[in-house]
Image: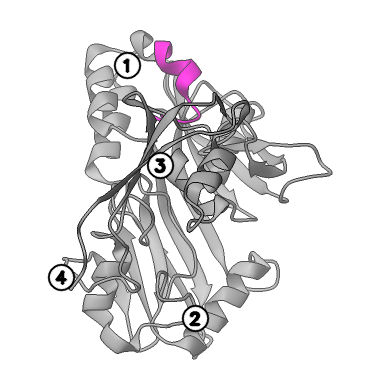
Amino acid sequence: MVDNSIEERVGTVAEGGIRLDRALVALFADLSRARLQDLIREGHVSRDGALMRDPAAKVAAGTRIVLTLPPPIPAEPAAEETDLPIVFEDDDLIVIDKPAGLVVHPAPGHESGTLVNALIAHCGASLSGIGGVRRPGIVHRLDKDTSGLIVVAKNDAAHQGLTAQFADHGRTGPLERAYAAIVWGLPQPRTGTISANLARSRFHREKIAVVSDTSGRHAITHYSVTETYPDASLVQCRLETGRTHQIRVHMAHRGHPLLGDPVYGGGFRTKASRLSPDARAALTALGRQALHAALLGFSHPRTGVTLRFESPLPPELTALVTQLRADGPDRTSL
């Protein structure tokens, strides 16, 4: 049985002028500093009823700190019966057309209702264990609010074969990944390559940032504009590498963030006022970044046969495209 109780601890800072995380280490010695930093960022530490989310914040002597410990997380995700949109399945792998809003694997704040929970119920003991108990069978990821195709390994041999292809990025094999993205403005040139290293932002932990060529992880996105509208464009993006938020960051770096992107498109929210009322309504209804994993191809890890899958735009993206097309006569199909 899982303990769902919440523990609350209270302490008073003895030494002033030190970092919050260090003060907590002195107060709650049974918890590691790394664990305490995570608890701070997740909103489990407060002072005078106000949350403190910066581990580096300085605290004064005599400050009363309240630490709320969430219930312990089960060591292994539970099986949860869910209707999975299965595109292909055999004894080695399963291809899912993931809907937007579905988290791929359990993480803080998303311990249940994930794709992994559904896969455990669907595949049972056959699911590959190489990814660990929290990510069984997971070879690659899609952001929670990105829809589209994802492949999962059902055994360790398939996991190893697929992982090798994704690590090779299609340089020597048939692996290909293409995304449909709706971006603000018209990228120039209309077909091009974005090569910019990516790393976790030093200022916003939830964001990825473009960094200098001497740091970060190598990231390359090839793009091609397929349709244009008065204030936006439909773009196909092909990944040569697969980094966290890669397309979203690369397109924003070029000055063309994705419509509806709450993290990287904040500076373009006023552009929505230039859309027609119907297009604005469709964008509001979308409620997420306009990004869809439309194509996935790879070599079957056991048979060597090339598999290639395509996924049409989901209804909410189709509705947005339809309204953008109706926004003006200067639309251009390429």
Q: Where in the figure is residue 21, as x and y percent of width and height?
A: 55, 40
Question: In terms of secondary structure, where does tag 2 sit?
Answer: loop
Residue located beneath label 2 in the image: 130
Residue located beneath label 1 in the image: 327
Q: Which residues are magenta?
A: 260-271
Point 49% across, 53% down: residue: 35
- Viewed as shown, does residue 207 lie left or right of 193? left
* Cα–Cα gap, marks 2 and 4: 22 Å
Residue 146 falls within the magenta-colored stretch: no
Q: Earlier in the sequence, mark 2 or mark 3?
A: 3
Above or below, 174 relative to 333 = below
- Viewed as shown, does residue 206 lie left or right of 82? right
* Cα–Cα gap, marks 2 and 3: 28 Å
Picture mark count: 4
Above or below, 83 relative to 275 = below
Point 59% across, 55% down: residue: 242
Residue located beneath label 3 in the image: 42
* Cα–Cα gap, marks 3 and 1: 42 Å
Question: In terms of secondary structure, where does tag 3 sit?
Answer: loop
Q: At label 2, which amino acid type do we have?
A: Ile
Q: Residues within 10 Å of mark 4 (few under 14, many from 20)?
A: few
Residue 263 falls within the magenta-colored stretch: yes
> Is the C-beta separation of discs 3 and 4 under 8 Å?
no
Indicate which disc residue 81 carries.
4
